[in-house]
């Protein structure tokens, strides 16, 4: 006669196969079939624990990839792993000063008082942690009190014992093939880690190594960017004054303030004046981008009559266009609203767009400036009949130092920062900037500014 337990075990195996590991496995008599039931029940318990471990590791991986801070991930680890691994304390230390110092970065404990906190440090050379680095393997101390008796000079062990810890597991942190620190699991009870699955602890440490390395690389990028901005600011500031002085003297000499000058000399002075003007514009771009990156760009918003503002900009820029035999036209919608904006900064944006259009257009063409209201914003556009931009290069337009294969029609110079600065200044006003272009047919640059009450 067929034993009914066999059918029950088969049903239990099918349920576990579908992911339900909490199955009722009847044992009955302790015969061979009953022993099979015991093994099946233990298998279910083991699989349930293993899947819980995998699920928690997946969540840690998700947090790492989401860019959460190291402290956020470690706090989550401390709360999440309690159901599946034993600990009353987790510590996290990094190798610093070229790997000579072990410095505590984070710690959390069930003890009333932390004895080893962030900033605690000890030399690596001659310590027991050095052996972990040399072997790349974790270390288990089953009885910390006994270990302290045999190593009375271990200050870190003494402090951990004072916290109440009696056993510990230390895992090395390894990222991109190099040791970067240690993760310490500690327990109030001795021999806690005597029979644990060490590989799981190593997996946790491995995941956290990734976020530590990401954090370090990000910090290096931040520091390099700050250094770059500082250098740009200093260099540009030190260049602007002497260039301005040279430009001023050239203008005075051109107008004969230091004596009569011939026409050929006037032409030379004009070329030098244009060159120094270009240099001054580039220096000002560098100063602007440096101020923007460091958060030091000053805005002075005020209520501005937009129609009068655009007309004034036209009067200045159409003279520049005429020098290249380009016609500048303007079409303004009637009754444009007054805007709250920094007129100096928005004039910088508009002038940049118009002078860019002049640079990349041929003589005899037309540049059209238009403005109209659209819902709760005003759209201002600059349309040229120039060379246009290839579709695969449009993404470079608003990037710092972004350059395309299109070249100015008269060899004008540029830093490649103008449009990046325009984008930041428009966005600082709560607006946006975009462009449309087709190679050989010209481009349209448009920016919007919100209509706000004063």
Image (cartoon, grey):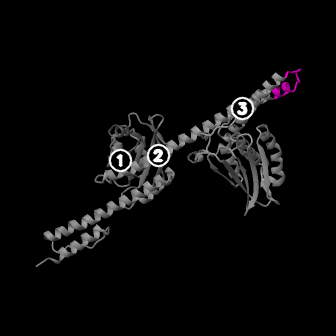
Q: Secondary structure at mark 3?
A: helix
Q: In the rendered structure, which disc, 2 or 3, sits on the residue that comes first in sequence? A: 2
- Quarter of the image for residue 151 reads top left
Residue 342 visible in the displayed image: yes
The percent coordinates of residue 257 (x first, y second) are: 89, 24
Q: Secondary structure at mark 2?
A: helix
Q: Nearer the viewer, mark 2 or mark 1?
A: 2
| Along the viewing direction, whichever of 21 and 260 lies nearer the viewer | 260
Badge 2: how crowded within 10 Å, few (<14), some, or many (20+)?
Answer: many
Q: Secondary structure at mark 1?
A: helix
- Quarter of the image for residue 27 reads bottom left
CA distance separating discs 2 and 3: 43 Å
Q: Which quarter shows the C terminus? A: bottom right
CA distance separating discs 2 and 1: 32 Å
- Quarter of the image for residue 296 reads top right
Q: Which quarter shows the N terminus? A: bottom left
CA distance separating discs 1 and 3: 72 Å
Q: Which residue matches tag 1?
A: 145
Q: Which residue matches tag 2?
A: 212
| Along the viewing direction, whichever of 50 and 228 lies nearer the viewer | 228
Q: Which residue matches tag 3?
A: 279
Q: In the rendered structure, which disc, 2 or 1, sits on the residue that comes first in sequence? A: 1
The percent coordinates of residue 303 (x first, y second) are: 82, 55
Badge 1: how crowded within 10 Å, few (<14), some, or many (20+)?
Answer: many
| Along the viewing direction, whichever of 133 and 284 lies nearer the viewer | 284
Residues drawn in magenta: 248-262
């Amino acid at each position: 006669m067929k034993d009914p337990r066999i059918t029950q075990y088969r049903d239990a195996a099918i349920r576990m196969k579908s992911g339900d590991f909490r199955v009722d496995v009847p044992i009955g008599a302790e015969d061979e079939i009953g022993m099979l039931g015991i093994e099946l029940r233990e298998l279910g318990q083991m699989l349930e624990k293993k899947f819980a471990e995998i699920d928690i590791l997946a969540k840690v991986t998700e947090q790492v990839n989401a860019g959460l801070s190291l402290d956020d991930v470690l706090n989550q680890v401390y709360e999440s792993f309690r159901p599946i691994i034993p600990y009353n304390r987790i510590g996290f230390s990094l190798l610093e000063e070229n790997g000579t110092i072990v410095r505590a970065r984070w710690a959390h404990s069930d003890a009333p008082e932390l004895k080893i906190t962030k900033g605690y440090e000890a030399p690596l050379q001659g310590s027991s942690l050095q052996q972990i680095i040399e072997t790349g393997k974790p270390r288990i101390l089953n009885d910390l009190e006994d270990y302290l008796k045999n190593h009375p000079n271990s200050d870190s062990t003494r402090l951990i014992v004072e916290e109440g810890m009696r056993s510990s597991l230390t895992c090395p942190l390894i990222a991109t093939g190099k040791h970067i620190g240690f993760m310490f699991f500690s327990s109030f009870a001795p021999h806690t880690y005597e029979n644990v699955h060490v590989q799981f602890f190593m997996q946790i440490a491995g995941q956290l190594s990734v976020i530590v390395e990401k954090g370090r690389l990000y910090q290096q990028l931040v520091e390099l960017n700050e250094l770059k901005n500082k250098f740009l600011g200093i260099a540009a500031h030190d260049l602007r004054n002497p260039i301005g002085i040279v430009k001023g003297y050239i203008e005075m000499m051109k107008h004969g303030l230091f004596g009569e000058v011939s026409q050929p000399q006037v032409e030379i002075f004009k070329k030098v004046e244009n060159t120094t003007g270009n240099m001054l514009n580039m220096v000002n771009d560098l100063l602007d981008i440096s101020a923007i990156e460091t958060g030091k760009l000053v805005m002075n918003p005020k209520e501005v009559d937009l129609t009068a503002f655009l007309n004034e900009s036209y009067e200045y820029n159409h003279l520049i266009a005429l020098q290249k035999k380009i016609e500048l036209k303007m079409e303004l919608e009637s009754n444009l609203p007054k805007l709250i904006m920094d007129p100096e900064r928005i004039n910088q944006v508009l002038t940049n767009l118009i002078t860019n259009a002049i640079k990349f257009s041929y003589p005899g063409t037309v540049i059209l400036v238009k403005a109209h209201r659209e819902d709760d914003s005003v759209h201002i556009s600059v349309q040229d009949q120039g060379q246009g931009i290839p579709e695969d290069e449009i993404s470079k337009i608003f990037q710092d130092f972004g350059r395309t294969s299109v070249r100015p029609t008269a060899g004008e110079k540029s830093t490649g920062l103008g449009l990046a600065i325009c984008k930041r200044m428009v966005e600082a006003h709560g607006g946006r900037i975009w462009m449309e272009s087709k190679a050989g047919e010209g481009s349209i640059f448009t920016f919007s500014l919100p209509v706000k009450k004063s």
